[in-house]
Amino acid sequence: MSATSTLERFQRQFSAAIRTPLDRTSGTLAAAPVQYSAELRAAVSAGAVTADERIATYNRQYWFRLFTVLQNAYPLTTALVGAWAFNIVVEQYLLAHPPSGHDLAAIVPSLAAFALGGSTDHASAARVPSDAFVDAITIDAAFYRAFVAPLETALVLAPADAPRLARAKLRWSKAVSIIDERRPLIALRRSLPEPLGEHRAPVPAPHDEPRAWLVFRPCAPTRRLLGVRSIPLEPAHAELLRVLREQSIADALAALERHRGVEGAAAQRWLAEGMQHGLWTHVDA
């Protein structure tokens, strides 16, 4: 066997070893060397430190690093369900979708879709209401999406745009989400300690009815990074923004007036606020 093929074999075995899920039976996250390849253990055995101890060090650090990355990206979900239960979700996700590149941030965006995919009832496993789990991970995903979205230049209208504006569609910034919460979870997210550590947050009582929020990172004509913001929306305001995702400005305003009886002045104010926040980047004819 050539030196190259021997190295490749060792790398495959070592990668498999550090991806071995940590054992939970003792109530702590511990490495399980019994699952390591005997060939690998023999290859790394040297000195006073056993092969199992050497491999287990990498095994533990690999998983702890991944847990930390995702806990930091989903702080509200982690605080609601607890780090132990959240790490179970992470482990299931990473076993189904192992990292394939050098950038660990690449594992973050797809966790929410996996957790909400229905293959496992994570809310019951974590002993929290299903709506709280769903909304928490959706909110965390919206904040993360706004944080990592590419920096864009906000829409600036010129007098020449006026004749075509009513029939045009607005192109949205990638840093914008409109979400509903059934409990005061965004307020809870704002109150979480940093670093989160082992903090466990109580599940708040539900609202009388869902409340809409705008989560976004403003973009400005100067391309200055302004940070992620969250703003509560009146029901009609939220409906207007959602309709603007699919329809022209004129059609959205007409639909809002028919369904909600909203006067044009209110809708025009909301459009102006959207321009100030940098929600849109272009006008598409």
Image (spheres, rainbow, N blue to C red):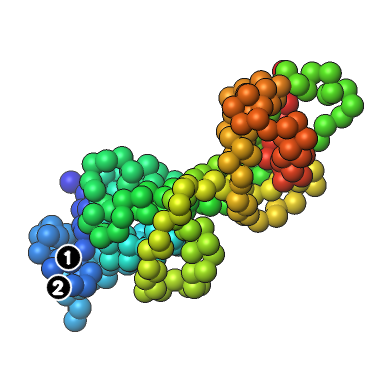
Which mark, by number, is residue 123? none
Report the residue at 37% width, 68% height from top: 202
Residue 48 in view in this figure: yes
**In terms of image quadrants, where is residue 31?**
bottom left
Say few, some or many: other residues with alpha carbon within 10 Å of mark 2 (under 14 / 14 to 19 / 20 or more).
few
Q: Which residue is mark 2?
A: 26
- All told, the count of numbered labels is 2
Q: Which residue is mark 1?
A: 23
Above or below for 107 versus 157: below
- Left/right placement of residue 68 relative to residue 251 reads left
Callout 1 amino acid:
Asp
Which x, y percent locates residue 257?
66, 27
Furthest-right residue in view? 159
Which x, y percent locates residue 143?
53, 52
**In terms of image quadrants, where is residue 18?**
bottom left
Report the residue at 13% width, 68% height from top: 25
- Closer to viewer: mark 1 or mark 2: 2
Above or below for 154 versus 93: above
Which quadrant of the rendered structure holds the C terminus? top right
Furthest-front residue in view? 261
Callout 2 amino acid:
Ser
Which x, y percent locates residue 278?
72, 42
Secondary structure found at label 2: loop
* Closer to us: 100 or 261: 261
Report the residue at 45% width, 54% height from top: 207
Contact (CB < 8 A) between labels 1 and 2?
A: yes
* Closer to us: 204 or 179: 204
Q: CA distance from mark 1 to mark 2?
A: 8 Å
Above or below for 14 versus 27: above
Report the residue at 47% width, 47% height from top: 210
